[in-house]
Amino acid sequence: MNSFKPEFIEKLKRAESIVFFTGAGVSAESGISTFRGTDGIWNRLKPEELANFDAFMRNPERVWEWYQYRKQIIHQSKPNAAHIAIAEFQNYFNDVVVVTQNVDNLHRRAGSKVIYELHGNIERNYCIKCKTEYNQPDLSFPDKKPKCKCGGLIRPDIVWFGEMLPEDQFSASEAAAQRCDIIFVVGTSAVVYPAAQIPLLAKRFGAYLVEINLERTEISSLADCSLLGKAGEIFPDILKEVKQIRSTEKLNRE
Ligand code: BV8
Ligand code: ZN
């Protein structure tokens, strides 16, 4: 059982608005590789080879196959204790927002309701030419080329390097960051921009920044509270503290 410093417990007592800013590390205990850790995807593949538009136009079959392979892994995995505890926060606070860089849909599957996806979602695809959506799970193409009926290429609805983030998701995330009392920065190396601006914005607007990671990161120097360890082990303990606070409040009211 993790113990937390009194200042953090005090913040939990007073907080109304919570943001969870998550990266690949929150899904690691679901068996999904991170990008830059020891088993990181980018150690084996270079992002420029696969996660960008030119790479896709050069070899759509290869990039498409890579995403179908990752989607298969995601379908075989399930939300872990961190996703589930994060979703449960909704029962104890009125304003809970998940801002995720992940494309794996696990926060939604865990029951989180307000989720902003800064880098898209692997379950969604669309035609580059006519924008028709192709979100059915088992898409297959005879010659492996992801082709729309209009002849255009179908691509994953994922933000690649060099591409803009979805404006509506990003501005809603900025608004949540500006109003939150606590921002949990979970399982992210915080090196990818502009997503990594969100925790900085929250901090600038007075939020208490709690970092949960296996190691120190680019954002650790800004953290008010750094919890080193696995998100799937730390979050259930934070949730226990929240439940304790709420039951004491209830007793005091009676
Ligand atoms: C844009 C989709 C311009 C693909 C992704 C130089 C300086 C600054 C910026 C740049 C630069 N050169 C280029 C840029 C811009 C670039 C960028 O930021 N590059 C970085 C790498 C330097 N950004 C972009 O290109 C963005 N677009 O800038 O457009 C523009 C502007 C205007 C108009 C037109 C264009 C687009 C960025 C989005 C790229 N897409 N993914 C795919 O998924 O296939 S990025 C990729 O990184 C993923 O989305 C991922 O979510 C994201 C961040 O990675 P993390 O989630 O943090 O994962 P990582 O593995 O790094 O870290 C995991 C952490 O978890 C570790 O710290 C580990 O310790 C921890 N952990 C592990 N296990 C656990 C754990 N923690 C807790 N518990 C555990 N169990
Ligand atoms: Zn089309």
Image: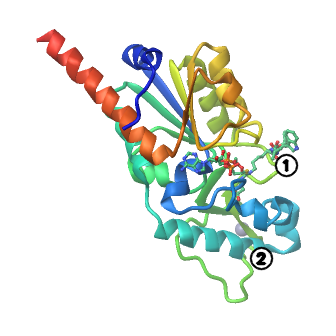
Question: In terms of image quadrants, where is residue 217?
Answer: top right
Where 141 sits versus 70, above or below?
below
Label 1 CB less than 8 angstroms from ligand 1: yes
Q: Gap in Å between the C-alphas at discs 1 and 2?
A: 19 Å
Q: State the mark number for residue 162.
A: 1
User: Is label 1 in a helix, a strand or a loop?
Assistant: loop
Q: Residue at x 53, y 65 (%)?
A: 74
Q: Residue at x 67, y 30 (%)?
A: 220
In the picture, which quadrant includes the N terminus?
A: top left
Question: In terms of image quadrants, where is residue 87?
Answer: top left
Question: In terms of image quadrants, where is residue 60?
Answer: bottom right
Mark 1: amino acid: Gly
Residue 148 in view: no
Task: Name the outermost residue toward the left.
Answer: 254
Q: Residue at x 76, y 60 (%)?
A: 42
| Residue 57 pos. (x, y %) | 86, 68
Judged left or right of residue 12, residue 157 is right
**Frontmost residue, 41 versus 215:** 215
Judged left or right of residue 187, residue 232 is left
User: Is label 2 in a helix, a strand or a loop?
Assistant: helix
Judged left or right of residue 40, residue 235 is left
Residue 32 in view: yes
